[in-house]
């Protein structure tokens, strides 16, 4: 479904010898799950933005990103807009930043669907029910600040799944919510993958979290992939000292 081959990303103003991502390669099968691990600033989110085509305009992307066999690296914005939401969707780190605080949930879902009215309301209700939000009609009438962090993240996931994408990218989806509900949100991603058969690209610095969610794993350091393979194998027998350090931090 997704094949990333030798991509390098440079941000404006950054030193030429210090790209944000350097020669990263991996693939993700339909229905598969791949984790990307590493500390903040290692290039995890940059890879996600490169796939979606939402890097800063001044950035430079080289290499290949193929989705469904078609090249999408540096594709025209019109082509990328057609993919976002319908084929590839993303759950961002902070649900409060992902939602407009001054617009009701219903209106924000209307924007995604491109329509309003009863049929749209029924679709939204089903999406919120799938994310186990109680009283979805009430949620639709609320503003994001009226919802808890966990409820907001469930709304964001429902919005990401609204148009039935085949690939879901989750970028540190539990780091901005209360620890008490993190396990519940992780369970939702596992359930969605099983129920919908979607492919999941899951980004986190927490290897214990990735162990629960992912079949395969990439470990990144300073913009480069330093270890990759089966998630359980890597976490049981890490080859790199950096991976061992991440694992110790996760388990400690």
Image (cartoon, grey):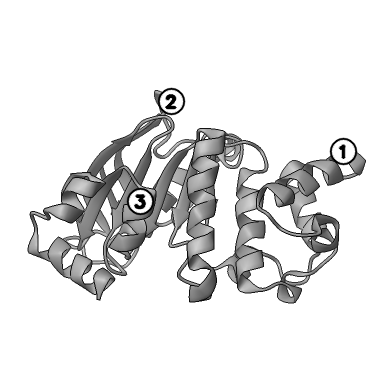
Q: Quadrant of residue 14?
A: bottom left
Up/down of 194 relative to 111, above or below: above
Tell me the element at label 3: helix
Q: Nearer the viewer, residue 35 or 116?
A: 35
**What residue sits 12% from the left and 55% below the top?**
238
Residue 126 position, x and y percent, is 76, 44
Residue at the outermost right position: 118
Tell me the element at label 1: helix
Q: Nearer the viewer, residue 84 or 81?
A: 84
Residue at the outermost top position: 69
How far is disc 3 from disc 2 in space, using C-alphas?
18 Å
Front: mark 1 or 3:
1
Circle 1 residue: 119
Residue 173 position, x and y percent, is 48, 61
Circle 3 residue: 47
How far is disc 1 from disc 3 in space, using C-alphas?
36 Å
């Amino acid at each position: 479904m997704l094949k990333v081959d030798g991509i390098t990303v440079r941000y404006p103003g950054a030193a030429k010898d210090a790209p944000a991502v350097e020669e990263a390669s991996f693939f993700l099968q339909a229905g598969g799950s791949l984790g990307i691990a590493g500390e903040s600033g290692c290039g995890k989110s940059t890879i996600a933005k490169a796939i979606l085509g939402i890097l800063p305009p001044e950035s430079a992307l080289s290499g290949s990103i193929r989705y469904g066999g078609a090249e999408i690296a540096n594709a025209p914005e019109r082509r990328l807009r057609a993919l976002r939401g319908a084929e590839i969707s993303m759950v961002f780190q902070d649900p409060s930043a992902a939602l407009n605080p001054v617009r009701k949930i219903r209106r924000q879902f209307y924007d995604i669907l491109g329509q309003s009215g009863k049929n749209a309301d029924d679709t939204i209700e089903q999406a919120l029910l799938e994310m186990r939000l109680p009283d979805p009609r009430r949620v639709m009438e609320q503003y994001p600040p009226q919802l808890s962090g966990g409820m907001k993240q469930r709304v964001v996931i429902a919005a990401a799944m609204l148009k039935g994408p085949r690939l879901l990218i989750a970028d540190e989806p539990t780091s901005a919510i209360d620890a008490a509900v993190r396990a519940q949100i992780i369970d939702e991603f596992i359930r969605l993958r099983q129920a919908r058969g979607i492919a999941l690209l899951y980004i986190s610095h927490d290897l214990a979290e990735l162990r629960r969610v992912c079949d395969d794993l990439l470990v990144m350091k300073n913009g480069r992939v330093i270890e990759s393979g089966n998630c359980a194998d890597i976490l049981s027998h890490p080859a790199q000292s950096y991976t061992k350090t991440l694992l110790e931090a996760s388990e400690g």
